[in-house]
């Protein structure tokens, strides 16, 4: 079973359009048997910031892949998680739609481009790539 960590903006909820799509993708990945680690629903409470930091770092390092949700504006945590994964040679698959904060026309934010193993326009494209990969196993 593969293990995937979701690096994301913590202020995106299931009520936002991006949040609804992210929740859908997470559910689909779990149906495929993927162990999905989503800090928004699993990490220690925000008030326990030291414990939360250690939990996130530990889970990034124990993952086979990080999915960076760059559909929304990201904070320091998601960027640090993606950079850590990149430095440790853990794949980073990024969801970065056209006309978003990190992608305009042919321009992609240099750090998103540099850290990403693959960049997808939509959650569905990311999921399709994951499904295609699992068919080969």
Image: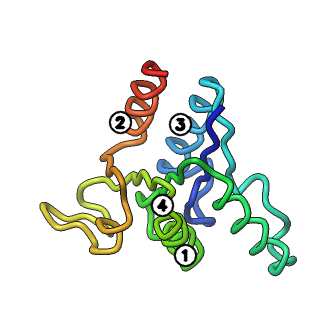
Q: CA distance from mark 3 to mark 4?
A: 24 Å
Quarter-of-image position of residue 117: bottom left
The answer to which of 73 and 30 lies nearer the viewer is: 30
Q: Residue at x 63, y 65 (%)?
A: 10
Q: CA distance from mark 3 to mark 2?
A: 10 Å
* Label 4 vs 1, first from the N-terminus: 1
- For the N terminus, give its image quadrant: top right
- Residue 120, image x and y in percent? 32, 47
- Residue 16, image x and y in percent? 53, 52
Name the residue carrying label 1: 80
- Residue 12, image x and y in percent? 57, 60
Q: Are marks 3 and 2 in contact (CB under 8 Å)?
A: no
Name the residue carrying label 3: 25
Q: Residues within 10 Å of mark 4 (few under 14, many from 20)?
A: some
The answer to which of 75 and 61 lies nearer the viewer is: 61
Q: Is residue 79 above or below residue 124?
A: below
Q: Residue at x 75, y 75 (%)?
A: 53
* Label 3 vs 2, first from the N-terminus: 3
Name the residue carrying label 4: 89
Q: Which residue lies most toward the top here?
A: 135
Asked whether, in this view, residue 134 is left or right of residue 107, the answer is right
* Label 3 vs 4, first from the N-terminus: 3
Mark 3 or 1, closer to the camera: 1
Mark 2 or 1, closer to the camera: 1
* Label 3 vs 1, first from the N-terminus: 3
């Amino acid at each position: 079973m593969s293990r995937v960590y979701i690096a994301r903006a913590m202020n995106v909820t299931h009520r936002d359009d991006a949040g609804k799509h992210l929740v859908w993708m997470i559910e689909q990945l779990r149906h495929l048997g993927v162990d999905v680690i989503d800090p928004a629903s699993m990490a220690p409470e925000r008030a326990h910031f030291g414990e939360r930091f250690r939990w996130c770092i530990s889970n990034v390092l124990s993952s086979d892949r990080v999915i960076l949700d760059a559909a929304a504006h990201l904070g320091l945590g998601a960027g640090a998680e993606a950079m850590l994964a990149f430095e440790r040679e853990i794949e980073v698959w990024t969801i970065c739609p056209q006309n978003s904060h990190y992608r305009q026309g042919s321009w992609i934010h240099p750090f998103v481009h540099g850290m990403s193993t693959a960049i997808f326009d939509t959650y569905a494209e990311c999921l399709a790539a994951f499904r295609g990969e699992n068919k080969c196993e």
